[in-house]
Image: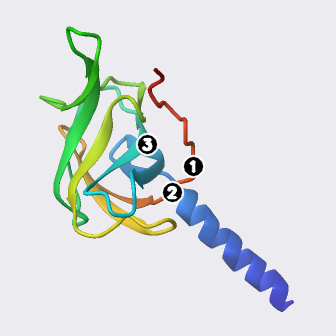
Amino acid sequence: MTYTRFFTAASAALFMLAAPAFAGEIMVKDPYARSSTPSSPTGAAFMTLMNHSDQDDRLIAASSDVAGRVELHTHIEDENGVMKMTEVEGGIALPAGEMHALKRGGDHVMFMGLKAPLEQDAEITVTLTFEKAGDMEVKIPVDHTRKPKHGAMSH
């Protein structure tokens, strides 16, 4: 009987970790964070944003205590064909009824001036601010092994 209770409690805990976060009708699914090295001053978070409402919305900011600065970033190609990372001006559009993936090599949440390393299996808290849905606090697991090529730029 003890094993059954343990299994039930463990299953419930696992479900809660995997459960998506909501702000109004905006849902965040499958978030994870990475840093480039244990001593890196930067890191990034990736996730899928889903707008279940009938109104367009926009991710306009992100914040977290893990870094001195948190910005919304994307990759753009310059006039010489070189991909560069840059801050997204005006936020990331999230049309009504659609989803938008924040992924490696594309749009993402960028942590600059990390206060401590983002260590494997740790969890960080990030507040996402949407134009209409408002603030959403998201618990994001740090996973350096997950999806190593998910959305990565190829040369």
Residue picked out by circle 1: 146
Amino acid beneath label 3? Met
Mark 2 neighbour density, 10 Å: few (under 14) some (14–19) many (20 or more): many
Left or right: 111, with 138 as reference point: left
Q: Which mark is residue 103?
A: none
Residue picked out by circle 2: 143
When asked about the image quadrant of residue 9, the answer is bottom right
Secondary-structure class at tag 2: loop
Q: Is residue 56 visible?
A: no
Secondary-structure class at tag 3: strand
Mark 2 / mark 3, whichever is N-terminal? 3
User: Which percent across, then down, holds residue 78?
Assistant: 21, 14
Residue nearer the viewer, 30 or 16: 30
User: Which percent across, then down, holds residue 11?
Assistant: 70, 69
Identify the residue at image location x=42%, y=35%.
Answer: 104
Identify the residue at image location x=41%, y=25%.
Answer: 97
Amino acid beneath label 1? Arg
Tell me if label 2 and label 3 are in contact, CB under 8 Å.
no
Residue picked out by circle 3: 47
Identify the residue at image location x=64%, y=70%.
Answer: 12
Identify the residue at image location x=53%, y=56%.
Answer: 19
Left or right: 87, with 47 as reference point: left
Tell me if label 1 and label 3 are in contact, CB under 8 Å.
no
Of badges 2 and 3, nearer the viewer stands: 2
